[in-house]
Image (cartoon, coloured by chain):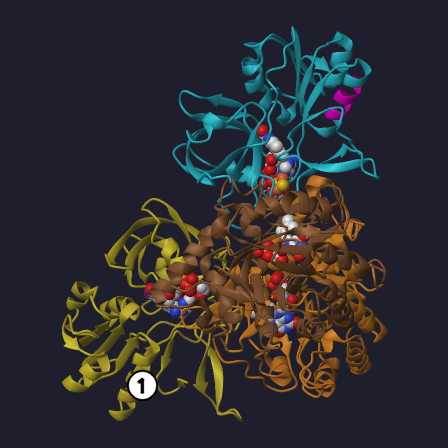
Chain colours: A brown, B orange, C yellow, D cyan
Amino acid sequence: MKLNVNIAGVELKNPIMTASGTFGSGKDFAPYVDINQIGCVVVKGVASTEWLGNPPPRIVETYGGMINAVGLQNPGVETFCKEDIPFLRQFDTKIGVNLAGKTIEEYVAVAERLASEDVDLLELNISCPNVKEGGVAFGVDPTMACKVTEAVKKVAGQPLIVKLSPNVTDITEIARGAEAGGADALSLINTLIGAKIDIHKRQFILSTKQGGLSGPAIKPVAVRMVYQVANAVQLPIIGMGGIMTGEDAIEFIMAGANAVAVGTANLLDPTASIRILHEVKTFMRNKGIEDINEIVGVVK
Amino acid sequence: MKLNVNIAGVELKNPIMTASGTFGSGKDFAPYVDINQIGCVVVKGVASTEWLGNPPPRIVETYGGMINAVGLQNPGVETFCKEDIPFLRQFDTKIGVNLAGKTIEEYVAVAERLASEDVDLLELNISCPNVKEGGVAFGVDPTMACKVTEAVKKVAGQPLIVKLSPNVTDITEIARGAEAGGADALSLINTLIGAKIDIHKRQFILSTKQGGLSGPAIKPVAVRMVYQVANAVQLPIIGMGGIMTGEDAIEFIMAGANAVAVGTANLLDPTASIRILHEVKTFMRNKGIEDINEIVGVVK
Amino acid sequence: MCTPTTRTREVCTIISNEMLVEQVYEIVIDCPQIVPETKAGQFVNLYCRHKGRLLPRPISVCEIDRLKGYLHLVYAILGEGTREFATYKAGETIEIMGPFGNGFDTNCVSDEHLIVGGGVGTPPMVELCKQLKGKKTIVVGFRDNPYLIDRFSKYGNVHIATDDGSVGFKGNVVALMEQQGFKGPIYACGPTPMLKGIQAYATTYNLEASLSLEERMGCGFGGCVGCVTKVSADTEAGYSYKKVCKDGPVFSAKEVLFS
Amino acid sequence: MCTPTTRTREVCTIISNEMLVEQVYEIVIDCPQIVPETKAGQFVNLYCRHKGRLLPRPISVCEIDRLKGYLHLVYAILGEGTREFATYKAGETIEIMGPFGNGFDTNCVSDEHLIVGGGVGTPPMVELCKQLKGKKTIVVGFRDNPYLIDRFSKYGNVHIATDDGSVGFKGNVVALMEQQGFKGPIYACGPTPMLKGIQAYATTYNLEASLSLEERMGCGFGGCVGCVTKVSADTEAGYSYKKVCKDGPVFSAKEVLFS
Ligand SMILES: Cc1cc2nc3c(=O)[nH]c(=O)nc-3n(C[C@H](O)[C@H](O)[C@H](O)COP(=O)(O)OP(=O)(O)OC[C@H]3O[C@@H](n4cnc5c(N)ncnc54)[C@H](O)[C@@H]3O)c2cc1C
Ligand SMILES: Cc1cc2nc3c(=O)[nH]c(=O)nc-3n(C[C@H](O)[C@H](O)[C@H](O)COP(=O)(O)OP(=O)(O)OC[C@H]3O[C@@H](n4cnc5c(N)ncnc54)[C@H](O)[C@@H]3O)c2cc1C
Ligand SMILES: Cc1cc2nc3c(=O)[nH]c(=O)nc-3n(C[C@H](O)[C@H](O)[C@H](O)COP(=O)(O)O)c2cc1C
Ligand SMILES: Cc1cc2nc3c(=O)[nH]c(=O)nc-3n(C[C@H](O)[C@H](O)[C@H](O)COP(=O)(O)O)c2cc1C
Ligand code: FES
Ligand code: FES
């Protein structure tokens, strides 16, 4: 059975990746799951300098999902290179680094620092608020998405994935913007913006009021967007959003994803990524699918 | 305990409304629920002429929600006036009519026809695809939202609610567009666009591929948007999106909604609207809230 | 003005939940409030315990035990929800609502009724056989191993067709009907291809046929217009959509437009 | 390279689930795989059956029965999930994962330990009392009716404070400590206001204090950085955030920055 997939020239042993921010840098999961079995580990957002993140509460449960407002807490790219890359390199898996920044310059700085490092893929998270342009995210404007992609691509030493936000009127516009900017691949979806109120305390539960909604609740939106984007651009696509089972993963692949990322499911069960991989294999065996690439985008 | 709320000059005996399309025109619910207890019944979308709707399958279940592609099947405004208004008038409740149309002219035609009829509120569903402008929905462009609101408001014989789509980058822009067009109130959210694939048959389950996601899964997005809109416009707001319990209803009211609409919950339990009303009363009693209007938008 | 009943979803006790054949189960539910109103060809909504699954699972009534106040339902494992149901044990409870739908017209007088069931469309025909007066010819089709045969045999001659010919006639029920030249008003429930065949058969031999259809449902009681089927109508388009849950599930073969 | 255990969520049998006082329950769970690794001050994740509720409910270990392989947890009904737990019956199963967190340092040598628990922060102190060597002064505070007192009395003098004075000292535990002038290394778990008070008390009298904190969790094992608490650090801002689930739940009073 052929499971390996090619994302922008990088060969993954299987299409199961981890979604940024839901697998840390692997350390906290190593006691539970054999990281060697994962196609690619995408680490949590890394910025040019340390980010402290948002005050608590950062997490709240919703029906079939959760909202987070971690705020990209991370030790900065230097510490990341010193500690996390060597750790992950112990394993036979690909390393994807999720880039965080508040300005084009910050994004460029991280990518530049990583250019000479032993990592396999970069994932540009354009859902971060763009401080320079007054907090509006790069991810909601095609021109800005193109600009930031272009700038990072210039200095990038690894293939560049651009991660799209679902909080837009037409995600295909943003996808085309990133494609025009030179993205090597696209990943989607990031979280939907949501909020929850504590009606007893009469206040929002999250310190930031609103945060990012993830989990099975958002899967239908994610599948729809993956299908739209797969039919709008020529780039390889990494699909995610509420994947809990192998059948969910197959759904994204049939919608047009070349690989999938497991997110919230990792938090609910640290072994989820591997369980999902096994469920994908079982489905392929039952359906007599020889090569996972056969079914990429079969649904028209 | 004071439960009555005022929506654009119309006094509702309580803030519980039904969400358009999830309560038919009441007939199918009358055997189960005492319609006299509902603050306002908003009927399913009514167009100037009969609409046949989409082919089946029109419904699919998702985690904590459902996707529908009914396609606004309705007998047209004439039949509606002949059959549904007299039926609903038997009950001591307000009547809201949801307006469907593919062009400004069609919307105007329905509103004109209803101007002299005994109904209390109009709800303009601007999520319908706008055929004239090539399928793009009125609800995703502030200028078009303003134009259609203006045109309908001119001929409207009842206060006009404009119903907003959540499938936009910035819902406050659309809200302001509707306000500028002369909307008397706003209702939100309509469904999120989603899709589900049958991985065994390798096809989308819905005949239209994608449809409208509703149910508890979308509540966090709805609460966030109600809060945003309540803080962006001066209009009364009807909040909806995944309301299953009285506590959910309270959450929307605290976020800034003057009234709430129960949707998918009616389909899962035809008595849901009344159960929710009772749960709202219980909450008020336990918290010593004398007047429901006290807590509208208390969360800042 | 209608005075509403307080009827809605009810928590009922499971009397038994046994496998009939591989992947097919019979669940007996104690629901004395529902039984008196229920007739052949109607269905009930079963609701899942897994709260990620909110929509009803419509299941036809297979047998009505009016004395005990029990409903007998026979379901096949087709997906997550029915797989969940199969794990339920006697003594546990299940949420159920109904009865829904028009059911079969059991007052049609004829000296020979033709009852046709296919796969998981067979169960509702049991109660129908009980209710129908007059001689009955019963034709049932299955992919492979049949079930409920013993129950049917009480009410008339049972003719079995299986795709693999492992039991009875090799082929589909319509081929079997052709071969035997069965006549009389038809009552049929089963997969769409079979119902299409029955519709054609009825036209050819000019027979009345009542077809029980399936469609995905949002509510089961007429509230969402989600469960429609295409029927001929004097609209410009020449068709319109009717609700399977309320106008059906039983439709006249004359009006149904299969795509 | 670390070799992963196969440990993850486990389905365990409930031995008992009894009410201690109004709104407070003790659940005993048979989990021989978890018990050997568990120590005082750690917690486990409990997962709901209601599949709309996906996140873990972290509950501290109240007592560890190493012979039987049982964990004793004491929880208060605070919301939907704990309300659900209260309906579970002996013999049923529950999904559990753990143990998680650093736990208390039980090796600290001192001739007088000061153990302070408030409300649902009291349970973890029972196992701590068991483990700690040396004399123990135990101070527990409740809004009204106390619980677990009998278990504490085995390990030292128990001083009770209640907000309404219905039992013991009228007021909060810190006021009681002031009045009695209790000294010694402090181990405390309870609501934030109480922990703030303890922190001040420890500073004033220059005592060591270990505080067990609570925060909303996404995973419980360090994976989401969701459960943080503010601690002093030599960052530009003068603080940083540490994970309650992994760096805690027990922190030194010296580092915690209460807002
Ligand atoms: C009027 C009526 C009577 C029926 N009677 C029986 C019966 O007596 N015995 C029996 O075995 N089956 C019967 N069915 C089919 C049965 O409802 C489905 O097999 C069942 O809903 C599948 O649920 P699931 O969760 O296992 O499948 P899933 O695919 O996991 O279900 C996902 C969603 O799709 C819906 N769905 C999937 N397949 C169907 C279908 N064929 N028809 C309607 N909804 C579907 C489910 O209700 C659920 O909402 C009947 C259907 C209808 C409409
Ligand atoms: C390390 C630790 C140990 C704990 N030990 C105990 C204990 O021994 N006994 C006890 O009664 N309680 C304990 N708690 C608190 C307990 O976790 C919450 O009361 C419980 O999660 C509430 O769940 P719920 O579904 O009833 O409330 P809901 O408000 O319905 O829960 C909604 C979400 O918020 C989370 N949440 C709500 N309140 C809290 C809280 N105070 N802390 C953490 N998460 C919360 C829930 O886990 C859930 O994800 C502990 C908390 C932590 C962090
Ligand atoms: C706790 C948490 C932290 C996250 N952090 C990041 C991040 O740092 N960068 C990023 O691009 N996405 C981040 N995400 C989004 C996920 O990578 C993913 O896009 C989203 O959660 C949808 O997938 P899921 O529903 O499977 O979780 C985070 C999500 C969660 C739940
Ligand atoms: C079956 C169905 C039909 C609907 N039809 C309409 C409609 O005709 N007009 C409209 O404005 N909204 C329609 N909606 C959207 C609902 O009114 C509501 O905005 C949405 O479902 C969110 O609320 P809920 O999650 O409580 O269902 C429909 C929703 C459903 C589920
Ligand atoms: S299922 Fe809702 S109308 Fe038939
Ligand atoms: S709960 Fe996830 S890191 Fe602590």
- Whole-percent x, y for residue D94 in the image: 45, 38
* Depth check, front residue: B189 or B124: B189
Mark 1 element type: helix
Residue extent of the magenta highlight: D194-201
- Whole-percent x, y for residue B281 in the image: 67, 48
Q: Is residue A288 left or right of residue B226?
A: left
The kind of residue on which mark 1 rests is Gln
Residue at the image point whose x is 14% and y is 84% from the top: C180
Q: Residue furthest front?
A: A116
Q: Main secondary structure of the magenta part?
A: helix
Q: Is residue D41 left or right of residue B285?
A: left
Which residue position is annotated with label 1?
C199
Q: Is residue C240 visible?
A: yes
Please tell me in which quarter of the rendered image ligand 4 is found: bottom right
Q: Is residue A80 left or right of residue B69?
A: right
Residue at the image point whose x is 79% and y is 75% from the top: B142
Image position of A290 with respect to A279: above or below: below
* Depth check, front residue: C25 or C252: C25
Q: Quadrant of the C terminus of chain D?
A: top right
- Residue D189 inside the magenta-drawn segment: no
Q: Residues within 10 Å of mark 1 (few under 14, many from 20)?
A: many
- Whole-percent x, y for residue A153 in the image: 71, 66
Residue at the image point whose x is 57% and y is 48% from the top: A89
Marked residue chain, label 1: C
